[in-house]
Image (cartoon, helix red, strand yellow):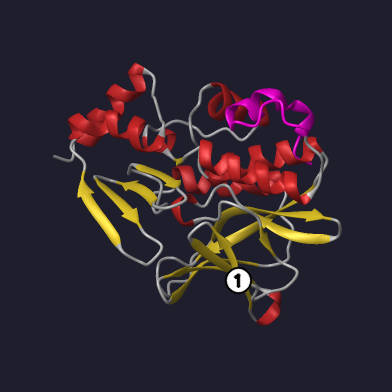
Amino acid sequence: MWNGDELDLDAYLARIGLGGRELRPDLGTLYAVHRAHTAAIPFESLDVLLGRPVALEVKAIEDKLVHGRRGGYCYEQNTLLAAALERIGFEVSGRGARNRTRGDSLLAVTHATLVVTVEGEPWLCDAGFGYQGPCEPVPLARPGTEVRQGRWTYAVHEEEGGVLVLRIRRGDVWRDLYAFSPQQYHPVDYVVLNHYSSTHPRSSFVGRTLVQLPGDAVRTTLVGRELTRLHPDGRTEREPVASDGLIDLLDREFGLRLPERDAAELVRIHRSGD
């Protein structure tokens, strides 16, 4: 389903720092790959901001995220992760989710996430939800089970109709991240969602800078002209980002080094808001 046979698995593993590791379709490998992927490949939608199409073919994603050492957003990130896991031998299926981080607004299904089955047990795997997303798999077989990932705690809550909700604890408060149903999504479904997310004027990705990284101690996000650091206890730190410091910040905070042409265009867009 995920065209894992097209992926240069050795190059992918080198990109995420697991080169030379023996891999089996077991839970230990799933944890290792998920954790390494989210640590190495930042969430970003800069191609959308630059007005460029976002391709979801495996080789195109490999060229960008692996060889080009760029990041990507959920459709790219989780398509790449799914292809790698499929190639290793895992059973991988897709899901479509509704973002719940924006209050009580009912949003359309636009987020792509994955369910991976290991020894008959399903696990939520998601390398594409940005700075609040999980860095490791989250169990789905026992809704309500709290899982610690470093200093962060997650749980999946079950609602009426079999809807599952991924939650994160910030301080003493549980916050919904997204909700998804058991309906299986296929790569072609993500092509449709990707078109909306990358082109529709109401998409949250169109017309703004968005780069994120889910670090172990601090979660970091650049949205527009502001850098925010989120702490496990709920504290947030914010600082403005000037145009002349943007490219250095992308390298320092997110490990992103853009080609000269892209960097110049990004700075020009950023500066136009001065």
Q: Is residue 210 left or right of residue 194?
A: left
**Is residue 267 shown left or right of residue 157?**
left
Quarter of the rendering containing residue 184: bottom right
Magenta stretch bounds: 1-22
- Residue type indicated by callout 1: Glu
Q: Is residue 95 magenta?
A: no
For the residue pair 241 and 34, the one nearer the viewer reads as: 34
Residue drawn at point x = 64 percent, y = 28 percent: 12
Q: Classify mark 1: helix, strand or loop.
A: loop
Locate residue 164, reporting x and y percent.
64, 71
Q: Which residue is mark 1?
A: 146
Residue 46 percent coordinates (x, y)? 40, 36
In the rendered image of this protein, does residue 168 appear above or below residue 211? below
- Residue that appears at 73% across and 44% down: 29
Relative to residue 209, is residue 57 drawn left or right?
right
Q: Quadrant of residue 162?
A: bottom right
Question: Horizontal and vertical percent for residue 112?
Answer: 60, 52
Residue 9 drawn in magenta: yes
Q: Is residue 77 visible?
A: no
Residue 199, above or below 3? below
